[in-house]
Image (cartoon, grey):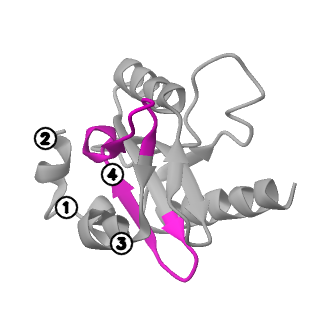
């Protein structure tokens, strides 16, 4: 239960940051368990750019997502007209964002993001919401 509360708190934190950056934003608090529909954790848009986001946080261990979670995210984003993003946050670090296709895929078909990968290769929050780098993000 503590892990779920921490995850919920991190999702609310991301929602508040997106809101402060001028995005209309909605959180689906129990996206994984409340419905059989494929829902992302967070939906955000500013009139020009729309994101469907699966958010995960960790104390420092690698973050894993099941293949099913990522497939659901991609399915929803495609049908909704949004850019699919995986958001990861490690303790004492900021949020970093990845297109699902840029994440490491394990032999079992799951997805993994290590802390050092997030810091070195992830899109930071300012880049995600900024206009100067938006074209490169939308290519995915």
CB under 8 Å between discs 3 and 4: no
Q: Which mark is residue 131?
A: 1
User: Is residue 79 left or right of 67 when viewed as pictured?
Assistant: left
Which residue position is annotated with label 4? 98
Secondary structure at numbered mark 3:
helix
Q: Residue at x 43, y 49 (%)?
A: 112
Residue 38: x and y in percent read: 57, 22
Cα distance, mark 2 to mark 4?
13 Å
Label whose residue precedes the other's in the sequence (1 or 2): 1
- Which marked residue is nearer to the observer: mark 1 or mark 2? 2
Label whose residue precedes the other's in the sequence (2 or 4): 4
Which region of the structure is painted magenta? 89-111
Which residue position is annotated with label 3? 116
Compared to residue 5, the image places residue 25 above or below, namely above
Which image quarter: residue 138?
top left
Q: Residue at x 45, y 32 (%)?
A: 70
Number of residues whose C-alpha sits closer than 10 Å to that of mark 3, classed few (under 14), some (14–19) or many (20 or more): few
Q: Residue at x 69, y 16 (%)?
A: 36
């Amino acid at each position: 239960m503590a892990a779920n509360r921490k995850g919920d708190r991190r999702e609310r934190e991301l929602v508040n940051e997106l809101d402060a950056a001028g995005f209309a934003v909605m959180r689906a608090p129990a996206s994984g368990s409340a419905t059989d529909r494929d829902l992302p954790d967070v939906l955000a848009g500013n009139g020009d750019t729309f994101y469907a986001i699966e958010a995960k946080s960790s104390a420092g261990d690698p973050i894993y997502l099941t293949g099913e979670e990522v497939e659901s995210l991609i399915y929803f984003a495609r049908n909704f007209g949004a850019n699919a993003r995986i958001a990861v946050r490690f303790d004492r670090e900021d949020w970093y964002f990845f297109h699902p296709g840029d994440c490491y895929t394990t032999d079992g078909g799951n997805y993994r993001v290590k802390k050092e990968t997030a810091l070195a290769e992830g899109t930071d929050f300012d880049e995600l919401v900024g206009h100067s780098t938006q074209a490169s993000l939308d290519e995915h």
